[in-house]
Image (cartoon, rainbow, N blue to C red):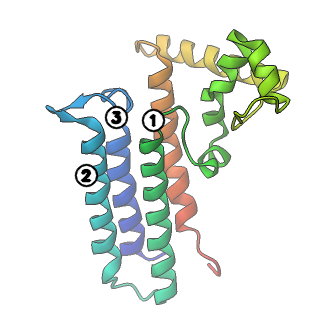
Amino acid sequence: MKNNIQTALETVNKELQALMSLYVETEAFQGDFQDSDAWEYALCELNRIRGIIRQNFCDPTDDMPLWQVLLCASNAYRILDETEFFIRQCEVPGVATRWKKINPRLIYFDCAFELMEKCPDIYRDMRHGLTGIRLSCYPDQELVRERNAYFAAAKEEFAGSGRDFSEAQLFQDELLRTLPMLFEEAAQLPGR
């Protein structure tokens, strides 16, 4: 990929990283931030980032074919739209299914695990389709073991680095790990 398109994708990634790094500080974009409503701030930032995409992909100087430039721009907009979807969901994990495919650790934050543990009868009924509520995943024992090992390792890692452990902070860390994966995929073009 040519330099200015790669740089444009990196710029959008950096901007979204900065926004998503506020997840804990803004209480999942539901609290206050810089004396304003965090949710409104996040939506304004997303609009500002849309402008960055328009600006960076509007007049490329690469010798790339126009269709490749437009595909990269489309991929960047898709990531931005998925980020907005996440912020508007106001739930954990609340991310697009594609994000969970790219980073399966995001599944570990699904409410199904808590339901399974704290309300096993309700979880069983949901899993059997006996309620009007559908979950995005239905963990089995293997996934529960994987999740438990993941959280145990994360707690050790936090303690080893002197950080206070919280699920919200760990979730934010996973969101920040996911964004570069999304942009790496966005940079992959057919025929290259």
Q: Name which residue type carries label 3.
A: Phe
* Residue drawn at point x = 46 percent, y = 40 percent: 176
Left or right of 32 on screen, residue 171? right
* Pointer 3 local density, CA inside 10 Å: few below 14, some 14–19, many at least 20: many
Q: Earlier in the sequence, mark 1 or mark 2?
A: 2
Q: CA distance from mark 2 to mark 3?
A: 12 Å
* Residue drawn at point x = 24 percent, y = 43 percent: 41
The residue identified by callout 3 is: 29
- Which tag is nearer the camera, tag 1 or tag 2? 1
The residue identified by callout 2 is: 44
* Pointer 1 local density, CA inside 10 Å: few below 14, some 14–19, many at least 20: some
Q: CA distance from mark 3 to mark 1?
A: 8 Å
Left or right of 96 on screen, residue 104? right
Q: Is residue 104 above or below residue 147?
A: below
Q: Name which residue type carries label 2.
A: Cys
Looking at the rendering, in which quadrant would you find the C terminus?
A: bottom right
